[in-house]
Amino acid sequence: MTKVIFPGSFDPIHFGHIDIVRRASLLFSEVVVAVYDKPIKTLLFSPEERIALVKEAMEGLPNVSVLGYRELTVSFARKVGAQAIVRGLRVFSDFEYEFRMALANKRLEPEIDVIALITDEQHTFLSSSTVREIAALDGDVSSMVPDFVQRALKAKFRALGDNQTVVPTSSLKD
């Protein structure tokens, strides 16, 4: 029986994340989607909102659970009894980042392995920040996120109004 965690901030969860979790759920006995509480970036959704959206996205996957955490990822993995951390790779730059993180995590917790799953080609462009930016500009994210996430994004940006500072200005506006 192999238990793994799939950590991330999931701000918001998108179809790329969901694809990785579904595939991991076929490979491992138990998958814990670990929603990180304190990433070093500006978040749109609160930890509770992100956990609720991830739980809804995981409905129908009986061997998948969702938990929040606020410690080192390897410490959380050890605490929940996971043997490995699952990560998704989209592009070459992801590999470099994940490779460095895997080495650091191995130094901290030699018994916890990192397993990388290559994203499905249709999701290679997807990131939570891309989804947030498109949604902030009232763009169509229906092909990127489940409908309940799209509704949550619309409601959040409506509540924040035009003066929101969660999504920085970038090239999608140009």
Image (cartoon, rainbow, N blue to C red):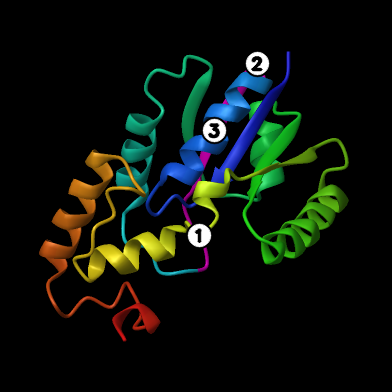
Q: How many marks?
A: 3
- Is 35 positioned to the left or the right of 118 in the image? left
Q: Earlier in the sequence, mark 1 or mark 2?
A: 2
Q: Could you say which disc has been placed on residue 21 in the image? A: 3
Which segment did they paint magenta?
28-40
Kind of residue indicated by mark 3: Val
Q: Earlier in the sequence, mark 3 or mark 1?
A: 3
Of badges 3 and 1, the one in the foreground is: 1
Is 35 in the magenta? yes
- Nearest the viewer among 6 and 23 is 23
Kind of residue indicated by mark 2: Ser
User: Which of the 4 image quarters holds residue 11?
Assistant: bottom left
Q: Give the secondary structure at mark 2.
A: loop
Kind of residue indicated by mark 1: Phe
- Nearest the viewer among 67 and 102 is 102
Residue 13, given in percent of the width and then of the height, sits at 40, 46
Q: Pointers 3 and 2 in contact (CB under 8 A)?
A: no
Task: Assign the N terminus to one quadrant of the image.
Answer: top right
Q: Tell me what residue is drawn at x 23 percent, y 40 percent.
A: 148
- Nearest the viewer among 116 and 35 is 116
Residue 81, given in percent of the width and then of the height, sits at 69, 25
Q: Tell me what residue is drawn at x 35 percent, y 78 percent.
A: 172
